[in-house]
Amino acid sequence: MTVLTNEMFAIFDQPEFSFKKIKESHSPAEVAELKASFKNVWQIWKKVNETVASQLPENKFAKVHVESWTNGWNLRDHFWASYRLAYLADANPCLGVMLDKKQLQVYLMFQHYKSEQRQGTPQEYDQLLTEIPAWAKKLDLSHWYLWDKNEMELADHMSLAHYLSEQQLQQRFNAEAQKTSFLLGKFAFRDQNQVDDMEKYILDALLQLTPLYEKFSLN
C-alpha cells in the first residue's frame, strides 16, 4: 500500500525539464541531486504499477509498460504507464495511468504516438462514445472526467456527470472529439483528494474502465 504524497506531485514543480538548460543554471551536484530525486519518485511509481499489474486478472492483460523518468534529453514532466488487454496488445487504444504536478489520473485513451505501428483508427476507437451512457449507469460518477485529445494536459476537463446530464452537450462533444479522439478517466487532484492506497485506486479504476475498453473492436 503506497500513499500518494504531496512530495510525489512536487517533483514536477520544475521551471525547466531540459538537461541542457538545467545544467546551465545548476552545479553538477545540484543536477545530480535533482536526478536522484526524480528517479527516487519514479522507482516508487514503477513499483506501484508493477504491483497493480500483478493484481489484474491473470492472462487478461499484456505486460504493463512503465515509461522511463527521462527520455535522455529531458526529465519527464509527468510519469506514465500503459495497460493493454492481451488480445489488443498491438492495438492503439489502451488504459493509461499518469501522475503530474496537478493530479493522478487513470483513463482510457487512443495512443496517437507511433500509432502507425499498431492497429486501429481513431474513428474505430471513437465509436466507444456511444457506449459510455450504458457503461456509466452503475458507476459512481464522482471524480470522473471526459475530454478531447486537443485539450491541454493540465486543463480543467468536463465532468462525466455533466456530460451525461445533457444530450445536446453529448452530441456537441462527440462531434468535436471524433475529429481527434476522446479520453475518459478518474482523477485524484493534488491538495483535494487523499489517496492512501495508490495500488487500490489505480486497480479499481482500471477494472471499472475495462468493460468499456473491451467494447473496442477492429473492423
Image (cartoon, grey):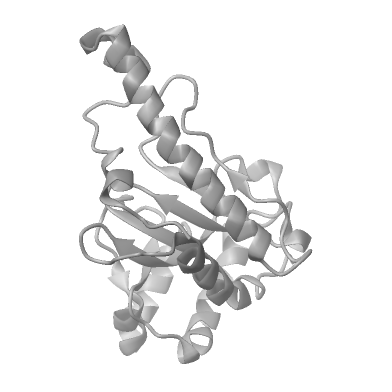
Q: Residue at x 62, y 78 (%)?
A: 211
On the picture, is 218 further left or further right than 45? Answer: right
Q: Residue at x 46, y 39 (%)?
A: 42
Residue 71 picture location, percent across and down: 49, 26
> Is the residue 82 above or below the residue 166 in the image?
above
In this rendered view, identify the residue nearer to me: 150 or 30: 30
Q: Quadrant of residue 173?
A: bottom left
Residue 196 picture location, percent across and down: 37, 64
Residue 26 picture location, percent across and down: 24, 12
Looking at the image, can residue 102 be seen? yes
Q: Residue at x 45, y 86 (%)?
A: 139
Q: Residue lying furthest front in this view? A: 1
On the picture, is 62 further left or further right than 107? Answer: right
Residue 157 picture location, percent across and down: 29, 64
In this rendered view, identify the residue nearer to me: 104 or 33: 33
Q: Quadrant of residue 142?
A: bottom left
Looking at the image, can residue 94 be seen? no
- Marker count (numbered): 0
Which quadrant is home to the C terminus? bottom right
Q: Quadrant of residue 61?
A: bottom right
On the picture, is 61 further left or further right than 138? Answer: right
Q: Residue at x 52, y 72 (%)?
A: 204
On the picture, is 164 further left or further right than 156? Answer: right
